[in-house]
């Protein structure tokens, strides 16, 4: 990660603007807080179902909602008088905007050419023929300035796709007849009664105040500035330390440069725009390592929750040595991730660092962590090692964690597997950890580039839900073939593997349904961005477009809203099975099929973990969207 960790991928769905977290209503059933822990807002992550709850579903009075969706309006209302005019105006605007963006890209290429003209060896650009030199020059620019080329072709493809969608026939005016969001919410309320309470859960993208013990908002001494998309491992390090030390704090969110502009009030306290930043007793403290040292020096950790060894102790020296090893691992991993050459040597360096981590963990047989019990070392190691595991599998086909597709990691690094399992049993880490899809797409805009070596192609296709690979569809396998997903916290102690697995899947489906229902209007608007032109100016993050508005018309909104309600209906009542074609409402099958499917797929690729929901819930939501879109 670069210094400052300017990051963002799904950032245009951030908490206070649009997406799942837009000033949303709380989940139907909240989590009971432990006596020493409180939060000013309700938890995002759904608690788990107990494994024995499935047989009692009939006792809750749940009803199977009818498969109603949209119905054409009869009579004169069936035709929108201005539909043709609106369509023509939309197409004309799209053409003009497309031409403007096309000319802008060409001008960028010309400017690049003028800059390079005096420094390039022209002999390298010779191409046979009368236009050889200009053609060779343009080819050189496109090859060297990949970002210009990428932007150029993005303009062409986005413009063509938009014009194709805009040219679709205008739909009849439609009206929704059910199941309504209110009906779906009632069913979630009944099912939520079956969920167990899990103390300590919170949302890093929604909980603006974390209180521990007897603290009140007025007595909080720490203001924590972190990235809105919850990408940054350095922000994760600080927040994990605050949580595990039981230090009360306010949270302020700020964009990273790769997905948006920074808030002026943040730039006043951090002119360089680097994250994380803490205001501790009014003093601005920058740099994650320095923040942790100041928190320790001021003794803000609650009694019994001090996770940093005291100065002069033997454990402090051991912790510092382990933290140095974390930075060595980070350096080797980033070198390999960004390098298209020396693949074998870079891989050997990463393996050597992982062997060293394994040896350090093996020195403490009394516990799974580096110092035996959870300490500041885990705050440093957690964010790095989970990103190493995700990106190495995706870009290099190299597995740090044991998965059904590759068990070798479990044999070579068994203590690292135990360390991950112990870490995932802690609520603070579970609320802050991402999934393979999120990390694999949030790292390139942070690092500038990530270089695949070809060996991870099958894994990358599955993580991305590429059609034909079997991912993002129903029914989901009990185990993800490439990504280990832990059981929900309430089921960690469950002995019956099959029952625990089914209860975990049901819990994840409820969490995904609740996240969509909590803010369904904003989610619908966000999905409709697929029917609009890309926003300007653009940002570095591939899947982020904060300046893009919603597209389509009223009928498109009704169709997308209907499709989302059908997705949620199946999340609540489908039991994880694939829906049959006759379950899709006729209006969705007959009207605007490509447009609403395009919108749902746009949403499907922009679900952020942990910002919007947990990894298991995101897996369920992506698969249910995929299952509806293929009908």
Image (tube, rainbow, N blue to C red):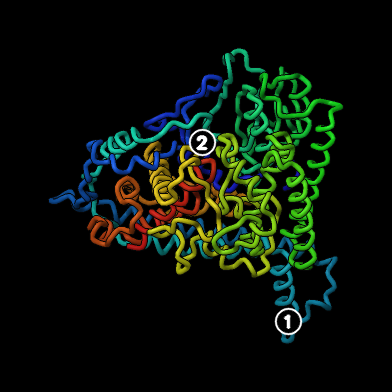
Q: How many other residues sit within 10 Å of disc 1, few (<14), some (14-19) or many (≥20)? A: few
Q: Residue at x 84, y 32 (%)?
A: 314
Nearest the viewer among 604 and 170 is 604
Residue 356 is labelled as none
Q: Is residue 621 visible?
A: no
Asked if residue 384 is positioned above or below residue 274 in the image, the reply reads below
Q: Nearer the viewer, residue 292 or 170?
A: 292
Q: Quadrant of the C terminus?
A: bottom left
Residue 549 location in percent, x, y?
47, 46
48 lies left or right of 397 = left
Q: How many numbered marks, from 0 up?
A: 2
Determine whether 172 is above or below 341 in the image.
Answer: above
Residue in the image at 42% along x and 41% along y: 511
Looking at this view, name the residue that lies furthest to the bottom: 129
Is residue 300 positioned above or below 327 on the image? above
Q: Nearer the viewer, mark 2 or mark 1?
A: 2
Q: Nearer the viewer, residue 546 or 244?
A: 244
Say which of 500 and 195 sits in front. Answer: 500
Residue 20 location in percent, x, y? 45, 40
Quarter-of-image position of residue 245: top right
Residue 512, image x, y percentages: 41, 44
Question: Mark 1 sits on what residue?
Answer: 132
Label 2 sits on residue = 15
Q: Residues within 10 Å of mark 2 (few under 14, many from 20)?
A: many
Identified at 70% across, 77% down, the residue is 135
Q: Position of residue 5 (x, y in %)?
A: 70, 43
The secondary element bearing badge 1 is classed as: helix
């Amino acid at each position: 990660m670069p210094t400052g960790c300017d990051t963002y991928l799904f950032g245009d769905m951030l908490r206070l603007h649009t997406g799942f977290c837009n000033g949303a209503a709380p989940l139907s059933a909240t989590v009971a807080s432990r006596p020493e822990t409180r939060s000013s807002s309700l938890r995002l992550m759904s608690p788990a179902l107990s494994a024995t709850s499935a047989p009692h579903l009939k006792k809750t009075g749940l009803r199977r909602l009818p498969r109603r969706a949209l119905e054409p309006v009869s009579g004169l209302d069936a035709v929108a008088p201005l539909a043709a005019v609106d369509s023509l105006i939309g197409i004309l605007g799209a053409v003009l905007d497309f031409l403007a963006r096309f000319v802008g890209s060409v001008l960028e290429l010309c400017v690049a050419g003028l800059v390079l003209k005096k420094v390039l060896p022209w002999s390298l650009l010779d191409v046979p023929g009368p236009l050889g030199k200009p053609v060779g020059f343009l080819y050189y620019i496109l090859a060297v300035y990949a970002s210009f080329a990428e932007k150029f072709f993005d303009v062409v493809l986005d413009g063509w796709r938009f014009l194709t969608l805009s040219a679709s026939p205008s739909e009849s005016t439609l009206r929704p007849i059910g199941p309504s969001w209110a009906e779906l919410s009632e069913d979630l309320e009944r099912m939520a009664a079956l969920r167990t309470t899990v103390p300590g859960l919170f949302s890093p993208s929604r909980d603006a105040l974390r209180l521990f013990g007897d603290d009140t908002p007025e007595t909080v001494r720490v203001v924590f500035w972190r990235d809105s998309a919850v990408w940054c491992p350095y922000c994760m390090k600080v927040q994990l330390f605050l949580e595990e030390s039981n230090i009360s704090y306010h949270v302020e969110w700020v964009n990273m440069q790769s997905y948006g502009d920074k808030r002026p009030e943040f730039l006043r306290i951090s002119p360089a725009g680097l994250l994380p930043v803490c205001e501790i007793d009014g003093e601005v403290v920058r740099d994650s390592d320095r923040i942790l040292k100041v928190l320790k020096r001021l003794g803000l950790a609650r009694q019994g929750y001090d996770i940093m060894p005291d100065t002069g102790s033997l454990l402090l020296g051991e912790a510092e040595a382990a933290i140095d090893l974390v930075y060595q691992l980070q350096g080797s991993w980033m070198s390999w991730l960004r390098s298209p050459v020396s693949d074998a040597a870079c891989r050997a360096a990463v393996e050597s660092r992982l062997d060293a981590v394994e040896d350090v963990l093996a020195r403490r047989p009394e516990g799974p962590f580096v110092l035996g019990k959870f300490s500041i070392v885990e705050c440093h190691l957690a964010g790095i090692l989970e990103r190493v595991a995700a990106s190495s599998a995706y870009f290099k086909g190299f597995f740090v964690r044991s998965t059904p597709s590759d068990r070798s990691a479990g044999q070579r690094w068994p203590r690292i597997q135990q360390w991950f399992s112990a870490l995932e049993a802690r609520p603070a880490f579970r609320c802050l950890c991402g999934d393979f899809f999120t990390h694999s797409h949030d790292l390139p805009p942070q690092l500038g580039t990530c270089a695949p070596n070809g060996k991870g192609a099958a894994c990358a296709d599955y993580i991305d839900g590429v059609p034909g690979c079997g991912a993002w569809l129903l029914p989901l396998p009990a185990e993800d073939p490439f990504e280990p997903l832990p059981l929900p916290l309430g089921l960690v102690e469950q002995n019956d593997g099959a029952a625990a697995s089914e209860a975990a899947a049901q819990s994840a489906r409820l969490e995904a349904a609740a996240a969509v229902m909590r803010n369904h209007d904003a989610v619908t608007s966000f999905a409709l961005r697929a029917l609009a032109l890309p926003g300007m100016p653009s940002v570095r993050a591939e899947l982020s477009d904060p300046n893009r508005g919603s597209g389509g018309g009223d009928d498109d909104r009704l169709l997308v809203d209907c499709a989302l309600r059908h997705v949620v209906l199946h999340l609540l009542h489908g039991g994880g099975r694939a829906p049959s074609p006759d379950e899709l409402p006729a209006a969705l099958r007959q009207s605007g099929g490509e447009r609403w499917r395009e919108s749902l797929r746009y949403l499907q690729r922009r679900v952020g973990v942990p910002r919007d929901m947990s990894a298991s819930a995101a897996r369920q939501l992506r698969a249910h969207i995929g299952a509806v879109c293929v009908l």
